[in-house]
């Protein structure tokens, strides 16, 4: 009984469907839309026209068979071959307007120079136009209010690239675009978006024919992330030139919009590079393109999935193919749904529709703006007459363009899980800039410690000489050599030793704020030490010169305090020069960046050594004054040493020692000045040489002045001990003889 009931129910359903089909067929009226396709053999973009025609037929069939869409109407396409020619296209438009049934909408075109005049004419005919393949960004709502397109414009390729910048934290970019409206208009929008995102656009370059100079300028500005807008022909040229300029690999990342043909890089007739060279330059490049079909698996408005549609399309197309076939299919559905919207709103539209009627234009515009459905290319809806479609993201990996993800425009969502993993040429994503690391140069710590230790040892030796000079100041030989002035020589030498310690101090061992004071201390200590040491030496030599060589002099004894006054005058001159210098032109910390070098272990890191110097605005003038003043002092000392060379009293005559000291100081000063000028950027070497010169000259001066005195005292002490020993021995012998 149950089986009979089911069979009866099935029969009733079949009969009902047959009846409904017959009734629907009898009532349906024909409606038309005008189509514009480049189709003929040898016609530009004819592959597009022939490739989408199977999807047109398939869409019309699905629409007309749908149980709820246009149930009272049958949709037809009245189309012409535009030959991708503006004149032919316009003629086709007017022919269709003046012959045959009325066309409710315009569908096309695929060529911009055909779409443009038809879109301009459609405004005057109050017709809406829906394009299936024209992506030119000039067709905006403001300029063409009646123009819609189901395919995204080239402006739509900006958002996914901006999302990629955000995903990989690239904040510093450059752009390269072909100087044509198709590429410059979306580029300008992209730059505005980059500014609104507060990303740094380092350099923007365009080209007409030559791509070499723009690429060189990008390289000069160290642009690592490059956003490119150019056609397929120039893409090969750009990457050929990038290969030659080495603007590829782990240090560079190209993000280009690429609505190009399949394996476009294999055609090298327009470049001087081989396929392998272009492929090498392309490795890692990320390309954004139209997503031919949705990958979501959702059921579309036609009741089939995108994969099922593709199977039907493939069975019809033969050898023809166009990337726009899915958009054409969805475009027919958008037109059908818009016509249904109008039919529901105006039941009399079929009998009353006519061209150049504003009311019909307004209702069709409203219909398209309210159209929303799931298509084979994804959700279809118009925003300011534009379609927000899903964008395909591919990456050039190992010689092939591999899908790595999609960008969902309606959700503003980047999904990098819908394909192969992103593959980088290096270990990590390229950095958006060469990282600059300023390396503060300082004197090698080991060298500084060794030099400072040598200075401390020198100070200790000087203290030993000072103690010796004070203890034996009443010895005849020491007393005749002016022990008080000898003390000044020792103190001056101690100060020059101390200047080595200040010479190696920098902001690493102190602070930036303290550095000018360190510079001042260096000048004060070294000048005071020189004046004390050589001023005292020369002043006591002057006394010897006055006694033995000035025959007219009244043999007046020149007291020590007078010599101290001479040294004091020299110090006063030093104080006057240094004080004037510091008041009028104080020291400040100056830095100089040296030749950069690449980091030894880190990629894209440039190390720039930075030296610091003591500097003042008129430093050359003051240094010249000091050199002249000290030079005159050395010349005067050398003159005194020469004049007193025949004085035969060793305790008084230091002329030989002074001559050696002057010679040492003169040679080392000349060498030190030359080194400071020529090797000023090599801090370690300059410090080592200057420290050596100062320590050597100071030690030589101390030893020349005091070692002979120490030797004499030691010799006298030994002679005294020998005499005592001999006396004791003689006394002992006499005592023994008496006992015998």
Image (tube, grey):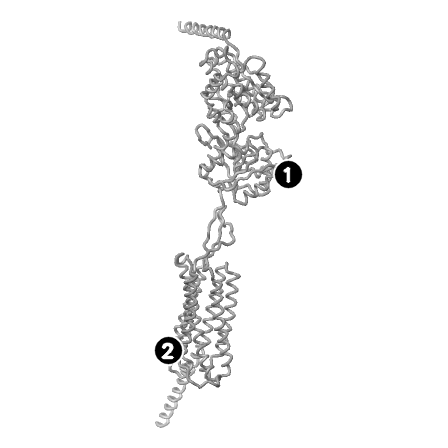
Residue bearing mark 1: 272
Image check: 217 left or right of 41? left
Where residue 581 appears, x then y in whole percent? Answer: 43, 64
Neighbours of disc 1 within 10 Å: few (<14), some (14-19), many (20+):
few
Q: Residue 708 lies in what quarter of the image?
A: bottom left
Where residue 11 appears, x then y in whole percent? Answer: 45, 6
Please tell me whether residue 283 is drawn above or below residue 569 in the rendered image: above
Can residue 46 be seen by looking at this rendering? Answer: no
**Picture quarter with the N terminus:** top left
Image check: 483 left or right of 113? left
Neighbours of disc 2 within 10 Å: few (<14), some (14-19), many (20+):
some
Where residue 353 appears, x then y in whole percent? Answer: 50, 13
Where residue 324 appears, x then y in whole percent? Answer: 54, 24
Can residue 184 be seen by looking at this rendering? Answer: yes
Q: Under tag 2, what secondary structure? A: helix
State how far apart marks 2 and 1 are (Cα). 89 Å
Foreground pick, 423 / 242: 242
Foreground pick, 412 / 114: 114
Please tell me whether residue 333 is drawn above or below residue 516 in the rendered image: above
Residue ID at (39%, 79%) = 560
Please identify the residue farthest to the left as the structure is shown: 739
- Circle on res. 124: none
Q: Residue 467 lies in what quarter of the image?
A: bottom left
Residue ID at (55%, 23%) = 120
Q: Under tag 1, what secondary structure? A: loop
Foreground pick, 158 / 473: 158
Mark 1 or mark 2, which is nearer the start of the sequence?
1
**Picture quarter with the C terminus:** bottom left
- Circle on res. 470: 2
């Amino acid at each position: 009984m149950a089986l009979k009931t089911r069979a009866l129910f099935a029969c009733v359903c079949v009969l009902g469907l047959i009846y409904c089909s017959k009734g629907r067929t009898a009532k349906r009226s024909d409606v038309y839309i005008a189509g514009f396709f480049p189709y003929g053999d040898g016609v530009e973009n004819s592959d597009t026209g022939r490739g989408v025609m199977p999807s047109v037929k398939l869409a019309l069939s699905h629409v007309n068979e749908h149980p709820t869409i246009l149930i009272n109407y049958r949709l037809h396409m009245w189309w012409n071959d535009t030959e991708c020619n503006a004149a032919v296209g316009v003629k086709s438009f007017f022919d269709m307007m003046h012959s045959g049934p009325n066309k409710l909408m315009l569908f096309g075109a695929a060529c911009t120079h055909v779409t443009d005049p038809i879109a301009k004419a459609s405004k005057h005919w109050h017709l809406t136009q829906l394009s299936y393949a024209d992506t030119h960004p000039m067709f905006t709502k403001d300029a063409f209010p009646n123009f819609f397109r189901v395919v995204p414009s080239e402006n739509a390729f900006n958002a996914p690239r901006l999302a990629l910048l955000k995903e990989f934290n690239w904040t510093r970019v450059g752009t390269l675009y072909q100087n044509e409206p198709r590429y410059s208009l979306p580029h300008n929008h992209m730059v505005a978006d980059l500014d609104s995102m507060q990303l740094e656009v380092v350099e923007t370059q365009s080209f007409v024919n030559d791509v070499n100079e723009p690429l060189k300028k990008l390289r000069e500005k160290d642009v690592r992330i490059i956003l490119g807008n150019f056609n397929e022909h120039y893409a090969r040229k750009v990457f050929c030139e990038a290969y030659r300029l080495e603007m590829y690999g782990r240090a560079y990342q190209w993000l280009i919009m690429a609505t190009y043909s399949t394996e476009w890089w294999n055609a090298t007739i327009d470049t001087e590079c081989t396929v392998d060279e272009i492929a090498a330059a392309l490795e890692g490049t990320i390309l954004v393109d139209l997503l031919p079909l949705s990958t979501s698996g959702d059921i579309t408005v036609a009741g089939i999935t995108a994969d099922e549609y593709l199977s039907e399309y493939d069975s019809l197309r033969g050898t023809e193919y166009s990337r726009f076939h899915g958009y054409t299919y969805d475009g027919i559905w958008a037109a059908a749904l818009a016509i249904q919207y109008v039919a529901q709103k105006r039941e009399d539209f079929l009998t009353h529709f006519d061209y150049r009627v504003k009311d019909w234009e307004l209702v069709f515009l409203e219909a398209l703006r309210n159209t929303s459905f799931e298509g084979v290319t994804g959700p279809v809806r118009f925003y300011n007459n534009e379609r927000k479609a899903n964008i395909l993201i591919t990456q050039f990996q190992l010689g092939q363009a591999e899908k790595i993800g999609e960008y969902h425009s309606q959700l503003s969502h980047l999904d990098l899980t819908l394909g192969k993993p992103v593959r980088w040429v290096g270990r990590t994503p390229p950095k958006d800039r060469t990282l600059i690391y300023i390396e503060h140069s300082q004197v090698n710590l080991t060298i500084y410690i060794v030099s400072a230790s040598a200075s401390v040892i020198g100070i200790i030796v000087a203290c030993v000489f000072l103690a010796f000079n004070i203890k034996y100041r009443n010895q005849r030989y020491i007393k005749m050599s002016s022990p008080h002035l000898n003390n000044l020589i020792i103190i001056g030498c101690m100060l020059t030793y101390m200047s080595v310690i200040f010479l190696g101090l920098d902001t690493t061992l102190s602070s930036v704020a303290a550095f000018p004071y360190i510079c001042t201390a260096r000048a004060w200590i070294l000048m005071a030490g020189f004046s004390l040491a050589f001023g005292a030496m020369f002043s006591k030599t002057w006394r010897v010169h006055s006694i033995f060589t000035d025959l007219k002099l009244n043999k007046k004894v020149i007291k020590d305090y007078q010599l101290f006054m001479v040294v004091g005058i020299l110090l006063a001159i030093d104080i006057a020069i240094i004080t004037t210098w510091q008041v009028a032109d104080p020291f400040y910390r100056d830095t100089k960046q040296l030749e950069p070098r690449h980091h030894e272990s880190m990629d894209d890191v440039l190390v720039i050594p930075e030296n610091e110097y003591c500097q003042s605005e008129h430093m050359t003038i003051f240094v010249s004054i000091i050199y002249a003043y000290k030079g005159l002092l050395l010349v005067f000392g050398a003159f005194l040493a020469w004049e007193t060379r025949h004085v035969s009293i060793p305790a008084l005559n230091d002329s030989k020692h002074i001559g050696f000291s002057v010679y040492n100081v003169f040679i080392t000063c000349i060498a030190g000045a030359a080194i400071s000028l020529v090797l000023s950027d090599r801090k370690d070497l300059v410090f080592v040489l200057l420290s050596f010169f100062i320590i050597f000259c100071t030690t030589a001066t101390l030893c020349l002045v005091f070692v002979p005195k120490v030797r004499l005292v030691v010799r006298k002490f030994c002679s005294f001990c020998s005499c005592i020993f001999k006396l004791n021995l003689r006394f002992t012998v006499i005592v023994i003889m008496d006992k015998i």
